[in-house]
Image (tube, rainbow, N blue to C red):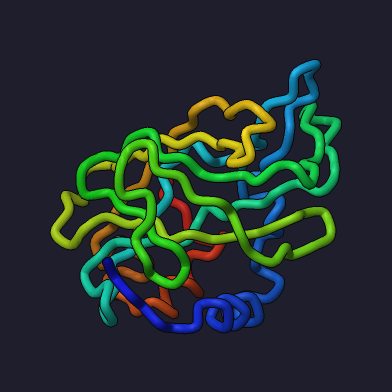
Amino acid sequence: MHQNRIHWGKVLVLAGLLTGGVQVQASEIDFEVGLSDTDTPVLTLIRPSEVDEPYVLARLAEGEFEGYYMNIEPGWDGLAVARPESNVNALDETVEVALERISFDASFKLYDIDGNEILTSDGDTRVFVGEPETDEFIWHEHLLFGVDPGSDTSQTYSATFRFVDSNGVYGDSEPFTLTFKPIEPQSCGGGGCGAIGMVGMILTLVGLTRFRR
């Protein structure tokens, strides 16, 4: 298990300041988790508009994750307000939303923002935490998605999840799958930009860089 003690909160704040007006609002790029507008509510999600395209994983040049391909997108928001246009209601105080691993492709791994590996086996869960960005959300969190050094960059890697209520009050969400594409250094922009450090990865990839098929 990796133990990376960089203060990620400060790095993310720095990233937000430096990207400024270019940064996309969280509600446009992150998953929003709420309750279905049905007689028997279950956990449900509003998907970012580009979620069916692979997310970029950039190769890191330094630190304990040197050589890994990683990204912190997508982020995750727990809804404090309803989204009537999507037939999704707000969460209430009885809901403790957790992310459950259904299956990961070989070489794919998930870490919390401190660099601790999580969801190491199918069926593992992790409760979402994190300070919300606005009063529309109960919590907001980023995780680190990655594949191992030496992974085949001609392939995409998939991870399938669902949301569960750790308190058992509400039913599980439908499973959903994310795909990720590791990129070689010459593919990350500028014709040979080289591998990047973790801060560079965050500044480059927070809501800005997505792989296009």
In the displayed structure, 110 sits above or below 90; it is below
**25 left or right of 121 in image:** right
Of all residues shown, which one is farthest toward the top?
39
Q: Give 204 or 144, whichever is nearer the viewer.
A: 144
x, y (%) of residue 86?
A: 77, 30
Question: Quarter of the image holding residue 5?
Answer: bottom left
Q: Is residue 50 visible?
A: yes
Which residue lies at the image location 80% right of the left edge and 62% below the top edge? Answer: 134
x, y (%) of residue 141?
A: 59, 60
Which residue lies at the image location 27% right of the left edge and 55% below the top edge? Answer: 147
| Quarter of the image that includes the N terminus | bottom left
Q: Give 21 or 17, whichever is nearer the viewer.
A: 17
Which residue lies at the image location 37% right of the left edge and 66% below the top edge? Answer: 116
Which residue lies at the image location 50% right of the left edge and 74% below the top edge? Answer: 203
x, y (%) of residue 50?
A: 55, 41
Q: Is residue 47 visible?
A: no
**13 left or right of 25 in image:** left
Question: Quarter of the image holding residue 37?
Answer: top right
